[in-house]
Image (cartoon, coloured by chain):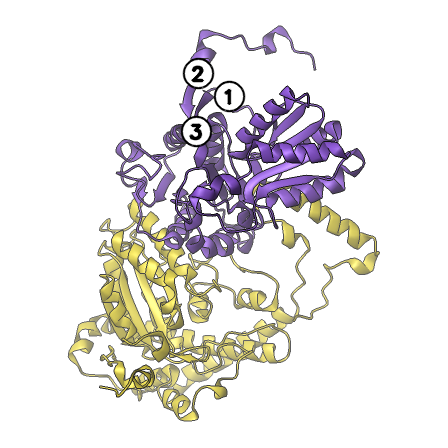
Amino acid sequence: MTDTVENVTPATDETRASVRSMPLGKAITAGLRQAMADDPRVLLMGEDIGTLGGVFRVTEGLQAEFGDKRVIDTPLAESGIVGTAIGLAMGGFRPVCEIQFDGFIYPGFDQITSQLAKMTNRHEGAVTMPVVIRVPYGGHIGAVEHHQESPEAYFAHTAGLRVVSPSTPHDAYWMIQEAIRSNDPVMFFEPKSRYWPKGEVDLSDPQAPLHASRVVRTGTEVTLLGHGAMVSVLLQAAEIAAAEGVSAEVVDLRSLSPVDYGPILESVRKTGRLVVAQEAPGFVSVGSEIAATVAEKAFYSLEAPVLRVSGFDAPFPPAKLETQYLPDADRVLEAVDRALAY
Amino acid sequence: MPANRLDAMSSPEAIDTPSPVQLLSPTGDVVDSAAADEFRPYVDALGDDQLRALHRDMVLTRRFDREAAALARQGQLALWVPSHGQEGAQVGLAHATRPQDHLFPSYREHAVALARGVDPVDILRLLRGHTHGGWNPADHQNFHVYTLVIGSQTLHATGFAMGLGLDGKSGTGDPEVDQAVVTFFGDGATSQGDVSEALVFAASFRTPELFFLQNNQWAISVPVARQSRTPLVARAGGFGIPGTQVDGNDVLASYAVSRRDLEAARSGGGPRFIEALTYRIGAHTSSDDPTKYRTDDELQSWIARDPITRFEAFLRGRGESDAFFADLEAEGDDLGADVRRRTVGLPNPDRGLIFDHVYSEPHPLMTEQKQWLATYEQSFGAAGDTASTDGGAA
């Protein structure tokens, strides 16, 4: 299709004005505010999200703006938060639950996996579950036990849930709104180490749908795939690789369930090599699943086995050891070297 | 004071026995007491037809239960969950609800299901392996589907009730409009964290909700004494929720206390809690053998307090005709025959049921795998068609 003059959007003052620089955490705040303004049935619920604005201040100011009937400080009970969100959704609300930290989600695990995920199926479509569960996740913040985990694979494994994770402020702003509009439950994993760095948010154009993966840097010799905070690590690795004369393409997974294999396979068919990176332990992980699928679907394009770079298959360590535990650009490049050696 | 901790663990005397609200004695005689006086007006307002309807619902539920148990024994159901013995508690509660109320059952509330217009065969479809749900609550007077994970539904009910509060659908002053939520659970469920969390949320948000506990004395093989060292009704007060214990085998007591508490909940008075003392005369399910864990003496003592026998004696004492009871028995037999005929004739579900409702919006894995299974089965020819009606289950 040829672009006509009419199809080209000129860079007017108006579109320039729609681009804002903000950190990822505040982009989620802005996305929540927009979703609440758009739909009066959207509710926020969680621990300390009201007057305090959440321990990461993601809901800061929203209770003052929308009132305590729409930004609800709940009792301290994760199963209670998710279980009552299910009932609220049955009553036509669109609850957005905040789980305070990744490792605190397990008390709500039954309500998420046995109830929330299965409710639409149990009702054979007669009941929908437009519930979003926001989960700050991942390491790099030097915190105590249960505050740096990456539990996304448990939920990607569970039929009935959709699982996404933005890596940039732009995606965070748009993806939270799209997750809230979804009539299925969405696990929204927020890379907490990326809450603070700023990035540009185009308030006029989402650029990609919720469940799309996306090439964020083009290259020709190896594909690097990751989600959440790992994407910035992969971009750093690609930059170093380029300086060393290796051309790496970076794909931002964005959606962990379903996985959008189109751009991933297209990239792998071009480069012939894939390194999948994640903070989560590698054993029975999202990265493992993608590695297996790419091996099945792009077998004749592969010049090397799909390699995984992960957190170790051990509990997240005390914070003084997190830099050894978490994959960094060097660990990614070590895998790139191995892939290129085939 | 027991001599040691082990004695304390096993001593049933450690549990105080409050006095449950009772309007009819086990022999069907009207009880005279201060508590009975408080609730008598609710019962006095019932006309002859309403009293007959209470009896009819109990008798038909028990007849349905008997047919379902027989179907399970004959291999026509994978499992049956008998309600025998608990009809008084359930029917009393059901008749105290209004059409606009929402009810969140566990999985033994057959009498309530039937009273809310659920087709009994839809209950059996769940136990025959045809569905995980069975009906759309919106089409069945807001009677929600059975929940099998113990206690989970109490949170769904509480969330729904929170929503009624947010929407101003209770406490309007108009009894035709005000809504309440009932959540059902058993003595075993009271040990689940979800039930405690539901009570916390309900109390904190003052939900228009009735927690209806049927204490049938046994959680499969474990007696209520292992769930609680205090009468379960006493738990409610600890959460700041008014609780009342009723004789659950007295349909009038269950009805009257439920009426009072539902009116309080609907009118903005916050949540209420009822512990209905009853007994599971049958097994936990058709897979269970209760003779392994409870005595025949105990069973007989509860059979002597049967809710249907009691209410029949009461109705006969008021001059109800033999013809009423004979007609009801015939109606029950017709129901049993109809349920049997339609259950064994159920067509197997289509394979699409595996995939079609996992998500409400398209999902690539569901699309791909549904197509794959169809192609795979077609590769075997017509014999691979799973949509045939072979009639068998389990």
Q: Quadrant of the C terminus of chain B?
A: bottom right
Residue tagged 2: A18
Residue A83, placed above or below residue A19:
below
The reply to whether callout 2 and callout 1 are in contact (CB within 8 Å) is yes
The location of residue A29, given as percent across then percent down, is: 38, 31
> Do callouts 2 and 1 point to residues on the same chain?
yes
Residue B182, placed above or below residue A162:
below
Residue tagged 3: A24
> Do callouts 2 and 3 point to residues on the same chain?
yes
Instruction: Identify the element where label 2 is drawn.
Output: loop
Q: Quadrant of residue B242?
A: bottom left
Q: Chain of mark 3?
A: A
Q: Quick one: label 2 or label 1, which is nearer the N terminus?
A: 2
Q: Can the viewer see residue A237 in this picture? A: yes
Residue B235, placed above or below residue A295:
below
Q: Which of labels 2 and 3 is toward the front?
A: 3
Residue at horizontal 28 percent and vertical 46 percent from the top: B168
Chain seen in purple: A
Residue tagged 1: A205
What's the distance in space between the residues labelled 2 and 1, CA to CA?
9 Å
Q: Amino acid at mark 2?
A: Ser
The local crowd at label 2, few if under 14, some if 14 to 19, many if 20 or more residues have their Cα within 10 Å, is few
Residue at horizontal 42 percent and vertical 60 percent from the top: B153
